[in-house]
Image: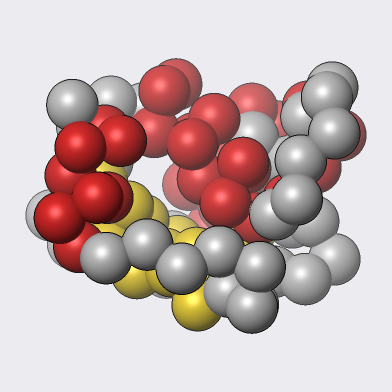
Amino acid sequence: MSVKIEWKIFTAETQSDGTWKSNSPNLEELLNAIASHIKIKEYTPDMEYSMALLAVKGLPYFKITEINSENLRISNNKIEQVQA
């Protein structure tokens, strides 16, 4: 299970341990500070998707581009609607 976010050349993906992995060490550090599993205060059926939503809320130029989750099935059209 993972959720990927992207903006220009930057990509980041949630990890099953509640952290972020990115092609940029600085972005990875920022995401782990603002959108880690520790920042999710309420129950959620899919922690990684909730982390991604929190990340794009804090970094609005990023978009969710891929969702690979057993708990959540969302088409590309619905991803766009969630972010609008």
Q: Residue at x 41, y 23 (%)?
A: 57
Q: In which image quadrant can residue 11 be found?
A: bottom left
Q: Nearer the viewer, residue 9 or 68?
A: 68
Q: Percent position (x, y) of residue 4? A: 42, 64
Q: Is residue 30 visible?
A: no
69 or 61, nearer to the observer: 69
Residue 63 x, y percent position in the rendering: 25, 46
Q: Nearer the viewer, residue 29 or 12?
A: 12
In the picture shown, does residue 62 fall above or below 28? above
19 on left or right of 7: right
Taking 4 as reference, is 46 above or below it? above
**Would residue 67 be found to the left or right of residue 75 on screen?**
right
Number of numbered discs visible in the structure rendering: 0
Is residue 37 visible in this depiction of the protein? Answer: yes
Quadrant of the rendering where the C terminus is positioned: top left
Judged left or right of residue 63, residue 30 is right
x and y, in percent, of residue 60 in the image: 28, 25
* Residue occupying image coordinates x 54% and y 30%: 54
Residue sitting at x 26%, y 33%: 83
**Residue at the image position 24 percent from the left and 50 percent from the top:** 78
